[in-house]
Amino acid sequence: MPILFLSDAGLHGDLLFSLISESLPFSWEKSEFGKQKHCLQNYDAIVVNCFGLAAKSIPGTEFQYLKGLEHSRVLLINLPDDLPAHITTPLEERKFVFLCDHRTGQQELVSKLASSIQSSQLQSDSDSRSRLLLTKREQEILAQLTTGEPNSIIASRLHLSEHTVKNHMYNIFRKIGVKNRLQASNWAKLHLQVERI
């Protein structure tokens, strides 16, 4: 999956994106704050250039956008070292990674970014291993789950008993590490082959 680079509009963001995308051999996409709200789960990680937060003592639209980011791997770069707690605390609570501040040199930035992205890809590889642990029948049931139908309908479509579907659901949830049908459905949409869903 590609990695999304988020920055404010301007030359600084463009130059930094060029440096990073040319230095690190990953699939990259670039977007500006507020332009990319949907489909964020289609990215392996999100790298956020926080350079624009430096001049603002009052949280602006960039900060509000950051607070609303829904992704498990957000890496913050170019952080101002004097950010007040009312800005950093909500980001820490979201488990965002504060990778480096604005004084970090280019080589160190690229190095830190490379190791963080590689560790996030290791997590992604474990997600792929989870998919491989599912039996063919579990994958079929999980694909049916994405339709939103109840177990009784899934059971009749696959010529199974409702109890068997329920047992498979329990095993699926345990294997992929989710707690409910919605999480399982979202996981399936991200990890199962497109033709199955």
Image: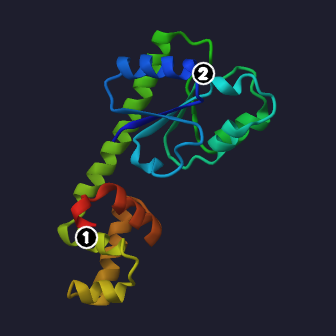
**Amino acid on which disc 2 is placed:** Asn
Percent from the top left, x then y, of residue 188? 34, 62
Residue depicted at x 53% and y 9%: 105
Residue depicted at x 62% and y 12%: 103
Q: Quadrant of the C terminus?
A: bottom left
Q: Is residue 124 left or right of residue 140?
A: right
| SS at mark 2 in the image | loop
The front one of 35 and 173 is 35
Gap in angstroms between the C-alphas marked 1 and 2 = 44 Å
Residue depicted at x 81% and y 33%: 58
**Residue carrying label 1:** 138
**Residue carrying label 2:** 78
Q: Is residue 55 visible?
A: yes
Q: Is residue 63 left or right of residue 165?
A: right
**Amino acid on which disc 1 is placed:** Glu
| SS at mark 1 in the image | helix
The front one of 100 and 51 is 51
Who comes first in sequence, dot 1 or dot 2? 2
Residue depicted at x 25% and y 70%: 138
Q: Residues within 10 Å of mark 1 (few under 14, many from 20)?
A: some
- Examine the image and state in which quarter residue 148 appears: bottom left
Q: Reply above or below: 172 against 62.
A: below
